[in-house]
Image (cartoon, rainbow, N blue to C red):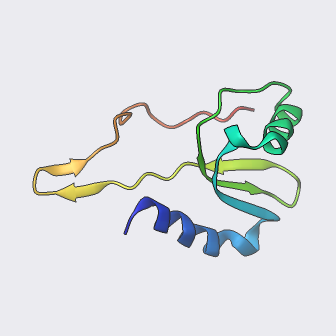
Amino acid sequence: MNERLIVEKLKTILDSKFMNIWVHKKVSASRCFKERVERELGYMPILQPEFDIVFKTYSGELNAIEVKYLKRSAKGQSLPYYHGIGPHQPLK
């Protein structure tokens, strides 16, 4: 199992619950997506190179999910370099 497979499985589970779902969305390469984000927020935030899951609700809200897969080895868990930053805060 890896992070990409987990994202694909999550998409199949969430597909029926949202209007649109995009996975592995490279927002820095999508003019349309960047325009939508700027229109929705009123400014352009610093964007990640890729969002794991972006979904649009039936009420028109855009949301994103960042998935992290932690591996356990004989030495312990392999933690991402930003472990300890804490939960991200919503923009609104």
Query: Residue 68 placed where, x, y %?
Result: 43, 51
Figure quadrant of residue 85: top left
Query: Residue 78 placed where, x, y %?
Result: 25, 48
Which quadrant does the N terminus fall into? Answer: bottom left
* Between 5 and 57, the one nearer to me in the picture: 5
Residue occupying the far front of the picture: 29
Q: How many labels does the image show?
A: 0
User: From what the image shows, is residue 20 above or below residue 89?
Assistant: below
* Between 5 and 61, the one nearer to me in the picture: 5
Query: Residue 14 placed where, x, y %?
Result: 66, 69
Q: In this view, does 2 lie to the left or right of 55?
A: left
Q: In this view, does 75 lie to the left or right of 12?
A: left
Residue at left offset 55%, top offset 35%:
88
Query: Residue 4 placed where, x, y %?
Result: 48, 62
Residue at left offset 68%, top offset 37%:
28
Residue occupying the far left of the picture: 74
Residue at left offset 82%, top offset 49%:
61
Which quadrant does the C terminus fall into? Answer: top right
* Between 83 and 25, the one nearer to me in the picture: 25
Residue at left offset 59%, top offset 36%:
48
* Between 52 and 89, the one nearer to me in the picture: 52
User: From what the image shows, is residue 16 above or below residue 41?
Assistant: below
